[in-house]
Amino acid sequence: MEFLTVHFQWWKRPSGVAAVCLGLLCVLLLAGIIGLSVYCKFSIKERDQLRTSYNTLTKERDQLHTRYNNLTKERDQLRTSYNTLSKERDQLQTSYNTLTKERDQLQTSYNTLTKERDQLRTSYNTLSKERDQLRTSYNTLTKERDQLRASYNTLTKERDQLHTRYNNLTKEAQADSTLEPGSTISVPFTVAMAI
C-alpha cells in the first residue's frame, strides 16, 4: 500500500506528469517520423511513377501531335488530289460526251455514205450493163457499116464499070450515027437503071 501510495504520489508530481507527457510526445514524434518516412518513401515512389507516367504521356502526346500534323498534311494532300481528280474526271466526262457525239455523227455519216455507195454501185452496175449493150450494138453496127461499105464499094465499082460501058456505047452509037443518019441509040435497060 505504501508503494501504491508512493506511486500515486509520483504521478501527482508535476515533473512526473511532464516526464510522462514528454515520453508520450517522444513516442508520438517517433511514430510521426516513422509515418512520414514511410509516407515519403511511398510519395517518392509515386512521384517517380507519376514523373515516368508524365514523361511517357508527354512523349505519347508529342507523337500523337506529330501524327495529327502528318494526318492533317495527308488529308490536305488527299483533298487536293481529290479536287484535281474531280476536275480531271469532269474534263474526261466532257471529252467522253464530245467523242460520243462525234462518234454518232460519224456513224450517221458512215450510214449515209454506205447508202450512197450502194446507190452508186447499183448505178455502176446499170451503167455497166448499158455499156455492154452499147458495145454490143456498136460492134453490130460496125459490122453492118463494114458490110454496107463493102457493098457500097462493090456497087461503086459496078457503077463505074457500067458508066464506062455506057460511055463506050455512047461513043459507038455516035460513031454509028455519023455513019447512018436518022438511026436511034438503043441503051440497054440495065445501064439506064444503073445510072
Image (cartoon, rainbow, N blue to C red):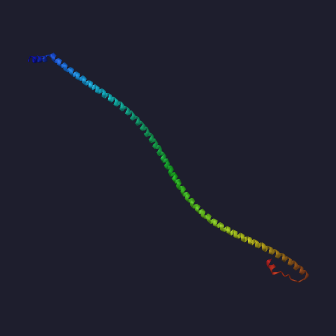
41 with respect to 11 (left or right): right
7 with respect to 153 (left or right): left
Quadrant holding the N terminus? top left
Residue 94, percent from left and from top:
50, 49
Q: Residue at x 26, y 25 (%)?
A: 38
The answer to which quarter of the image holds residue 74 is top left
Q: Residue at x 21, y 20 (%)?
A: 26
Residue reaching furthest bottom? 182
Residue 98, percent from left and from top:
51, 51
185 with respect to 56 (left or right): right
131 with respect to 26 (left or right): right
* Looking at the image, residue 2 lies above or below residue 142: above
* Looking at the image, residue 150 lies above or below residue 4: below
The answer to which quarter of the image holds residue 140 is bottom right
The answer to which quarter of the image holds residue 161 is bottom right
Quadrant holding the C terminus? bottom right
Residue 60, percent from left and from top:
37, 33
Residue reaching furthest right? 179
Residue 9, percent from left and from top:
11, 17
Residue reaching furthest left? 1
Q: How many marks?
A: 0
Q: Residue at x 23, y 21 (%)?
A: 30
In this view, the residue in front, 157 or 195, is 157
